[in-house]
Image (spheres, rainbow, N blue to C red):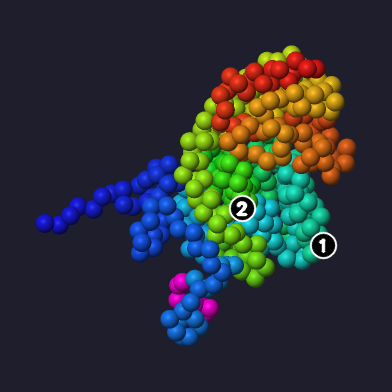
């Protein structure tokens, strides 16, 4: 009697939470339940002909952990299936993912258009690093898609943005910008770290590549560094793979294993943190000592309708501006007992940071003003604690000013 095939044996028929737990699993002959950690640098071959064939790409298999490793491949495959991408490559850090993704698309003489509201390190790559290699750039106010269209040139090969932005949580219309980029033959790269793969799918909206700092929500517990680039097999398997292979921004097998473990609870963590963040945003929006609360899924957000269009949840990041500037902002942050002062985000523990003196401190006063990063702005990464405790903690902090 033939045995009926279970339809759930096909990955594409599984839900996102199931994919995050099971996808990409490659078990050794020992049949372990938890993914194995292959902490080796090299691999052996049965004979010299096989070594030659693998180096030529004629035979599959592993060669050297700088560019392929079983633990890393499991993480890449699981993330690709979760994101809906054809392929992925993991890197040592989120900034390695951003730098590799951008550098792989351009050469001397090319031009990049980017949203000016970027994480400090990302803006450094666009504004300072790429020009050293003959790649010019134009920064635009990403809140209006037509600004990208006005900045495009014949030599524009790349468009780069993050949405929601760090730290003011402004939004960029991914679908509209994708249409503009593709009309000019350019590749669109989206940094999706604030939204997470739980709440936003840039590839479905037209992006060509998506990058994450896996250090953030994917790990989710402040344990390890990592990054990942996702997109088509053509883009990922081409220059991106070559740059990683030849220049070495590779993730360690141990860190890739940590990210695999983080993926198993990503959906549950992000959903709960998002529920907490929505309550925190409501509290801050109504507080008399807060001049502005910033949260994409709060109705006070100026781009609320766009948030509802391209995101399925507001995520866990909340920013707010206190009256009185840096001195008063420091008083609030220093008085908090549950929120930790740190520049990380996406952690199970709630975190507060002062962007003007940390993540964006290298920018001039003029640039900070252009980005709406005031001295009174505080950024929150809302964690898994009891929401009432977080609100009470913020309330006490605000009472100090």
Check disc 2 and report the residue beneath it.
226
> Residue 128 at x, y = what percent?
81, 55
Name which quarter of the figure residue 46 lies in: bottom left
Query: Would you name the residue on which mark 1 appears?
Result: 132
In this view of the protein, which residue sits in the foreground, 199 or 139? 199
Decide if residue 231 is in sight here. no
Magenta span covers which residues?
53-61
Q: Residue at x 54, y 27 (%)?
A: 275
The residue shown at (48%, 41%) is 265
Name, please, the residue furthest toward the right: 365
Q: Residue at x 63, y 32 (%)?
A: 350
Counting from the top left corner in percent of width and height, residue 286 is at: 68, 15
User: Magenta includes 327?
Assistant: no
- Residue 384 to residue 37: above or below: above
Say whether residue 54 is magenta: yes
Q: Secondary structure at mark 2?
A: loop
| Mark closest to the chain's N terminus, 2 or 1 | 1
Q: Is residue 217 above or below residue 211?
A: above
At x 39%, y 63%, the residue is: 28
Which marked residue is nearer to the observer: mark 2 or mark 1? 2
Q: Quadrant of the N terminus?
A: bottom left
Q: Residue furthest top?
A: 288
User: Across the whole image, how many numbered discs are drawn on residues?
Assistant: 2
Report which quarter residue 96 is drawn in: bottom right
Residue extending furthest toward the bottom: 48
Q: Mark 1: which secondary structure?
A: helix
- Vertical placement of residue 327 versus 178, above or below: above
Residue 159 location in percent, x, y?
Answer: 68, 52
Quadrant into which the C terminus falls = top right
Residue 339 is marked as: none
Q: Nearer the viewer, residue 293 or 256?
A: 256
Residue 286 shows in this picture: yes
């Amino acid at each position: 009697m033939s045995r009926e095939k279970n339809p759930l044996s096909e990955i594409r028929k599984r839900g996102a939470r199931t994919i995050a737990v099971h996808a990409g699993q490659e078990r050794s002959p020992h049949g372990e339940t938890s993914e194995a950690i292959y902490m080796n640098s090299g691999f052996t071959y049965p004979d010299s002909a096989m070594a030659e064939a693998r180096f030529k790409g004629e035979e599959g298999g592993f060669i050297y952990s700088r560019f392929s490793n079983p633990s890393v491949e499991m993480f890449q495959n699981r993330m690709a299936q979760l994101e809906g991408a054809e392929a992925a490559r993991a890197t040592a850090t989120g900034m390695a993912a951003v730098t590799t993704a951008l550098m792989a698309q351009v050469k001397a003489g090319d031009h990049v258009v980017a949203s000016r509201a970027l994480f400090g390190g990302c803006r450094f790559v666009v504004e300072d690093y790429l020009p050293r290699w003959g790649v010019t750039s134009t920064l635009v106010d990403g809140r209006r898609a037509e600004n990208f269209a006005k900045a495009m040139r014949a030599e524009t090969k790349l468009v780069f943005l993050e949405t929601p932005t760090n730290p003011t949580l402004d939004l960029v219309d991914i679908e509209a910008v994708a249409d503009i980029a593709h009309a000019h033959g350019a590749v669109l790269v989206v940094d999706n770290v604030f939204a997470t793969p739980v709440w936003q799918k840039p590839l479905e909206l037209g992006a060509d590549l998506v990058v994450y700092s896996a250090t953030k929500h994917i790990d989710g517990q402040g344990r390890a560094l990592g990054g990942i680039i996702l997109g088509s097999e053509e883009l990922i398997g081409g220059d991106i793979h070559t740059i990683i292979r030849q220049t070495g921004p590779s993730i360690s097998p141990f860190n890739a294993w940590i990210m695999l473990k983080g993926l198993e609870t990503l959906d549950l963590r992000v959903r709960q943190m998002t529920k907490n963040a929505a309550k925190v945003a409501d509290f801050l929006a109504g507080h008399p000592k807060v001049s502005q609360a910033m949260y994409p899924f709060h109705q006070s957000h100026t781009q609320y309708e766009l948030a509802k269009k391209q995101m399925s949840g507001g995520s866990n990041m909340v920013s707010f501006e206190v009256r009185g500037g840096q001195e008063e902002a420091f008083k609030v942050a220093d008085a908090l007992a549950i929120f930790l002062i740190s520049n990380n985000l996406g952690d199970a523990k709630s975190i507060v940071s002062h962007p003007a003196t940390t993540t964006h401190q290298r920018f001039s006063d003029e640039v900070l003003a252009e980005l709406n990063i005031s001295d009174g702005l505080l950024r929150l990464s809302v964690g898994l604690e009891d929401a009432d405790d977080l609100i009470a903690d913020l309330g006490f902090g605000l009472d100090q000013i």
